Image (spheres, grey):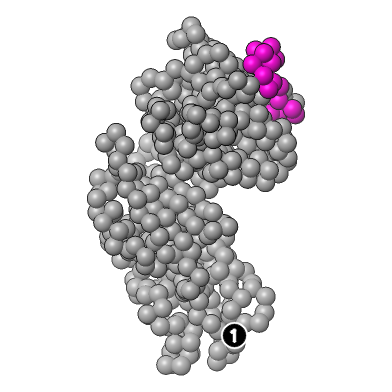
Amino acid sequence: MMYKALLIAVNEQRSREIDALPNTLNDVTEIKRLLTEEPAVFKQSDVLTLSGNLATKSMINHALKGFFSDASSENVLFLYWAGHGGFDQSDAYFIPYDADVSTISNTSINMSDVKKYIDETPAQTVLSFFDTCHSGALLRGTTINDLMKRGLDIKGSGKFVVAACTEDQSAWDRGRHGAFTDHLIRGLEGGAMNPRGEVDIYTLYSYVSQAVSNEFSDQHPVLKGTLSGAPIIIKHTKAREHAQQQQFVSQSSVTRRKVDESGDWFLLGDLRARHHSYRYNSSTKTYSLILKATSNARSIEMTLKQMLRTVRPFAIEDGAEYVQVEDVDVEVIDGEKTINLTLVSSQNRNGHMSHDMTINGIKPDDIAKLRIERFIFNQDIPSHVNTTFSGGMIYGTSSEYPVSDRLIPELLEQQVEPECIRLYVIAVLVFKSILSEVNEVSLIIQDNTIVRITINGNRPRIYSNEAPSNIMVDHPVTFPM
């Protein structure tokens, strides 16, 4: 069973006739944190967020289609949507960033289309939460009379919709979050856990519905869905609290953690930074990243602008490639700076050094492992390849993608975060043509020391005329942090 989430915050509006809802960004940020904090059933890489000027009608529709249509029957899908909702004469709509109030039906997302995605997805389990005005209209009929008469009508056992309010109510917003989401967050933090320390769809709805209704007499969350089998677990709250307590039982205890994801970090040239959200368009091979204001936002902005129209090495999540910095757009909304970064895959530089043969008896798989030992683990070049010809052919030249002889120790001396060190390792693996596909890069940290690095992936076909093979290295190391 694999859990996947799509979290949408329409916190900005291009039209000045529609009020912005900055709190919805807080909503999505907090929901993502709670879904992915350990012990989590959602992986960071399986939680997609859309917000700001990326939350357009076309982008949201594209994300919804991929999220629901590409799912398998074993997937558990979690959809959360925070933003405006509204009616025209016949239908109910979700309002995206680029909506136009004069043509609401053409520029917004019909709630019935979202209903259709939920109905037709192969996934057997769908949990959907909508914190919008009039979100209770979701999945009802196509006319106002039908909307008022019919209940929520989801097709398929195991599919649930929880809406912040009925179709004739408004969803209240206060503090840093919408009221509905504020109680949803409190429920995920432990308020909705059952006696086993688990939060499931029923305990969560019961908690949120009672809390919202007690606070606002004119807002009543609604739920529709049917269940076969045991309730679907959304979060293990008790286990999380127990794990946190165990960390402080004894300061003399051995602390050990595994870093196998890079979270919201990315590398671009010599810059390492954090994105708030990003999207990759495979048809145009374009990355769209949103960077929120940080203490060094001005420095990041200047560095990015200096990169405009240049090709730079780029690494994010489990991949790396050369990209052209196409656009750096800075917006200031309500005093908060947002940097919108557009990158386009470069077709001219792949970082590959071609080797179509065995070199001095050293086979392609062994060449890949020699490069890993040299560039990642800082080991000396073995004597049997320490010649001008063999060394250059096997290791390439420093100008192709320069790598320090002390890569990880130097990064640690600069106090680089382990998640970023992982990205640097991935960049070396790709740009030094060691791997073309990275399946795993993980660091084991024990007592403030990196003690083991595991690498798994497929080497590029360019090494030989043979089909690419899998390279696996599980290496004990000692890199004090």
Q: Residue at x 69, y 33 (%)?
A: 116
Q: Residue 349: percent from the left, percent from the top?
A: 47, 73
Q: Residue 461: percent from the left, percent from the top?
A: 61, 76
Quarter occupied by residue 178: top left
Asked if residue 62 is positioned above or below residue 195 in the image, the reply reads: below
> Which one is in front, 120 or 199?
120
In this picture, residue 151 sits left or right of residue 55:
right
Asked if residue 434 is positioned above or below residue 265 in the image, the reply reads: below
Q: Residue at x 64, y 73 (%)?
A: 468
Residue 385 sits inside the magenta stretch: no
Which image quarter is the C terminus in?
Answer: bottom left
Residue 149 sits inside the magenta stretch: yes
Q: Residue 83: percent from the left, percent from the top?
A: 48, 28
Say which element carries label 1: loop
Q: Which residues are magenta?
A: 141-159
Give the residue type at disc 1: Asp
In this picture, residue 294 sits left or right of residue 427:
left
